[in-house]
Image: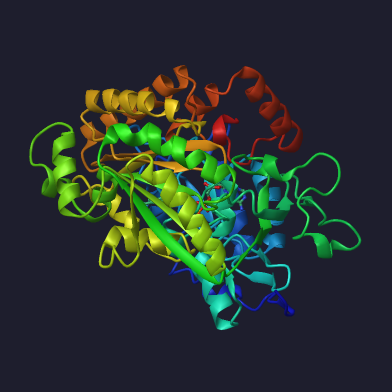
Amino acid sequence: MSGPTIDRRGLLGAGVATAAALGISGVAMGEGAVLAPGVRKADLAAALQAFRGVVGDEWVAGNAGSLKPWSKSYTPDPSGRHAPVGAVCPDSVEQVQAILKIANQYRQPLWPVSTGKNMGYGSTTTAAPGQVVLDLKRMNRILSVDVELCTALVEPGVTYQQLRDYLDEHNIPLWIDVPTVGPIVGPVGNTLDRGVGYTPYGDHFMVQCGMEVVLADGEILKTGMGSTKNPSAWQAFKWGYGPYLDGIFTQSNFGVVTKMGLWLMPAPPVYKPLVVRHKKVEDVARIVDAMRPLRIANIVPNVVLMMGAAYQLAMFHRRGEVYAGAGPVPEAAFAEFAAQHDLGMWNTYIALYGTSAQVAESERIVRAAFAAIDGEVMTEDQMQGNPWFHHHATLMRGGLSLEEVGLARWKGSGGGLAWFAPVAPAKGSETQGQIDLAHQILAKYGFDYTAAFAIGMRELHHIIALLYDKSDPEEEKRADACYRELVTGFGDRGWASYRTGVHAMDLVAAQYGETNRAVNAAIKQALDPNHILAPGKSGIA
Ligand SMILES: Cc1cc2nc3c(=O)[nH]c(=O)nc-3n(C[C@H](O)[C@H](O)[C@H](O)COP(=O)(O)OP(=O)(O)OC[C@H]3O[C@@H](n4cnc5c(N)ncnc54)[C@H](O)[C@@H]3O)c2cc1C
């Protein structure tokens, strides 16, 4: 790559976001709000009033009506513990520092979010009651793109769509890597929750490089090379010197990240998406064992999704179209519907990138590996008009799509969705037991097994979408209980989750043992002695 470094500092200013666009319509404090431990109603009111002095009236919300945009969530909350009591939207690092000072003064906890669309993990609701959302959407500047190094430095409110548009507008031949809800979410929030996408740059924390963090006391830390006399290597070298700190600011509550560097992928000369179809659920172990060496040797370089038929169908269809009966949808009904739509029971999406010679050679190896296990390898031409293939082919080149949000419409009108995502080594022997256990627990509570596996460099993420009707209070309670049993049932077998929603953070943290929790608690105490940053996040008080 060659070309200039483009400095965009300040060019995409805060004017892009308006109070109306963020849904702020009132500023009075809500009656009957559940407050954080030790915080009195008068403290919260005083903190909100002081926030108004920093950001202006229109950027603070504090009553039930004005807080609606921050209170909606797909995850179960049967006892109403997770709705925030306020929201404040700064547009600069200095405003973040001023807000933290006030929060310390009144001991008012804050829940930082970037684009705030952590859907299926809680969106902008909070892990413990009584918190004010620190919404960083207005800080949405693309600060720099280095075309030679293929790097970017962005603020928390920057969306993937914004970054894509910027690269296109400037004819920069770089790809981004996006989660399946790319247009409305952003690299900072996604990376901080250790999210994934589906190109070779799909492990977002792996391609993150350099952070600016405002600590709870208002001090500013730049990680990696960021605080040296020549910070031009800030987005080039991740590790800096001494203990590597970036990790402690992911899935944590130790600081507010206000800038983040990320690596971008050069557009390859040839891109070839493929799907491998298998007809039987029991093929799962063979697929993982065939895929593992291809991933480890980087012959298949992207994060591979092995999509179950039920998950695929739920993206574009409602449950009633597949099965009208009560209880979980029988496997035969899924199989019949899948066959009618040109889908296998497993649909494994992989892509090849490089010169035509490289891609041709990789395709030869992939075809041989899957021919040995009765996989049907299909190309883009053969899958013309198939919406699922089109969707995954878009994702594997970092394209933007919101189609998967259809999952939340699978049952009823309530939009209930909670991701359960246990991790295992990428070995076939780890799969069938998980599927059987998931079926057993989900069926006990009357839910369907709608799931996929994501195959990383060495690991297997089992991605189970617990889909329920949130408008039915009884079903919401059942979904909550079901999720808890999934966490403990899988945890007992050694399959702990890599990430979870605000409704289960303590429970998942418990799967990782007491020493781990004690170390996290010690770091928290050192960096945030008043516990004003997101108490409860990842089970850290
Ligand atoms: C249908 C569907 C498909 C999805 N597919 C994917 C997928 O493919 N991959 C994937 O990873 N996710 C996926 N998600 C989950 C989620 O929507 C995305 O991960 C999304 O990117 C997270 O929201 P966000 O980027 O707005 O982050 P945010 O909501 O802004 O942040 C996430 C969390 O990180 C922390 N945080 C955020 N910003 C800061 C900050 N500046 N300082 C300190 N802490 C901070 C907070 O705890 C926050 O709650 C999917 C969701 C749905 C509904």
- State the image quarter where residue 450 is shown: top left
Closer to the camera in the image, 220 or 370: 370
Taking 154 as reference, is 29 above or below it? above
Closer to the camera in the image, 286 or 323: 286
Residue 329 appearing in the image: no
Task: Give the left or right position of residue 87, taking residue 173 as reference.
Answer: left
Closer to the camera in the image, 127 or 6: 6
Closer to the camera in the image, 206 or 189: 206
Q: Quadrant of the C terminus?
A: top right
Colour scheme of the picture:
rainbow
- State the image quarter where residue 139 is shown: bottom right
Taking 153 as reference, is 480 above or below it? above
Task: Give the left or right position of residue 309, taking residue 107 as reference.
Answer: left
Q: Locate residue 78, reporting x and y percent.
A: 32, 33
Q: Locate residue 389, reporting x and y percent.
A: 33, 59
| Residue ID at (28%, 62%) | 387
Q: Locate residue 536, reporting x and y percent.
A: 55, 33
User: Residue reaching furthest right?
Assistant: 229
- State the image quarter where residue 380 is shown: bottom left
Q: Quadrant of the N terminus?
A: bottom right
Q: Locate residue 508, reporting x and y percent.
A: 50, 28
Residue 73 appearing in the image: yes
Marks counted in the figure total 0
| Residue ID at (10%, 33%) | 326
Task: Give the left or right position of residue 436, taking residue 320 as reference.
Answer: right
User: Residue reaching furthest left?
Assistant: 324
| Residue ID at (33%, 64%) | 390
